[in-house]
Amino acid sequence: MQSDTFLPSSDSDDHDSSDESYDNEELSNTNNIGIDYSNNYNNELTFLNQMSTLEYEGMRNKLFTKDVYKKIILINSHSHPHGGSFNSSNYIVKLNSSDTSGTSTVTTDLGKLKNVIGFQLITASFRVPQFNVNTTNNVIKYKVGNSLSNIYTVTINPGYYNVYELATAFQVTTSTESHRVNVAAFTVTYYGSNATMASGQNGMKFKMEHTAGQNIQFLWDYDNVSRGAARLLGFLAIPSASFEVSHHSDKPPDLSHHYVDLVIPEIPSIACKRNSHGREVVERMQIRYPTGEYNQFNAPTQYWNMVSYFNPIELNQLTIQLYAENGELFDTNNTDNNFEFEVTMMRKGVIK
């Protein structure tokens, strides 16, 4: 195989081989790889093709031997058989382990990630809950006027409801019915946008009246689930101002889901955002798709290079946790989710 050793500056074929050797200018057109010491200006060496060795080193480090490099990893919940206690809103991904004893553990062949100094979510896919009434918003707490020390509970069976079905369900306790409650403690009426209500009340609200005619106080701030029920039914997340037989909601009900907070406890706080519940959130993912569809999240491209760096750590596992707006685990009936993360690592790290 003929080697293309020289790159002549002329295409002429009549050059006499007896002529004198090519001068330095002709030699500078060779593609041989080596160091040219004859052009050692300002102590800067060049290759025979006149590229500065410093320029080459800079290009090499920029493209091939960077001190900091990035790797994309893919995580999905369906890699693990779903046992009885598996929760796709709270599971552990072991990065290089064959241990499958934990029913909430997903094992992968990603290998340990050493000298990690940055972590970002790039894309995600998760299912919008099929039920707008679920374990995050289906419990109502209240007190009765003649027994202020006791707290009573009404639980709505999870399911998909419209506002009229939700109102009707408060009088249904038959276990064969999907739209039901465990105790029929209230008579509930929903008033549409043009309905006639009590004096001073606008439409698109619920009226909740105690079935026994007793004065009651709702405890909408009792816990995260009762706060979710308050938003569902259109009440402020505070106790009722007074004990009354009937209560009107403060605003139109909200049967939708707004966003999901992704929490990974292994990621340092500096790379996260703190939410109102005190959790360190890797990313808040807005829900833009209808109930039951898979919501696609893509991080805005302008944020891809805005990495908050932290001291080098080693990642052996990732704990994936999804939280609803009220701080409860996101309830999707164990439907699958998947994530694409960008991990930034140091090539010359401190963790061996």
Image (cartoon, rainbow, N blue to C red):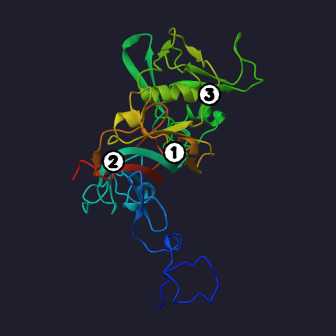
Q: How many marks?
A: 3
Q: Which residue is mark 3?
A: 253
Q: Which mark is residue 131?
A: none
Horizontally, is 295 left or right of 273 in the view?
A: right
Mark 3 secondary-structure assignment = loop
- Residue at 28% across / 60% down in the picture? 96
Task: Point out the tag, 3 or 2, that comes first from the N-terminus.
Answer: 2
Position of 88 relative to 173 (above/below): below
Of residues 263 and 271, which is closer to you in this image? 271
- Amino acid type at circle 2 is Val
Position of 261 relative to 51 (above/below): above
Of residues 311 and 101, which is closer to you in this image? 311
- Amino acid type at circle 3 is Pro
Horizontally, is 314 left or right of 300 in the view?
A: left
Task: Point out the tag, 2 or 1, that comes first from the N-terminus.
Answer: 2
Q: Which residue is mark 2?
A: 116
Mark 1 is surrounded, within 10 Å at the Cα level, by few (under 14), some (14 to 19) or many (20 or more) other residues, namely: few
Q: Position of residue 81 (x, y in %)?
A: 36, 61
Q: CA distance from mark 3 to mark 2?
A: 45 Å
Answer yes or no: do the residues labelled 3 and 2 have beta carbons within 8 Å?
no
Residue placed farthest to the left in the image?
Answer: 352
- Residue at 53% across / 73% down in the picture? 26
- Amino acid type at circle 1 is Trp
Mark 1 secondary-structure assignment = loop
Of residues 95 and 327, which is closer to you in this image? 95
Q: Which residue is mark 1?
A: 304
Q: CA distance from mark 2 to mark 1?
A: 16 Å
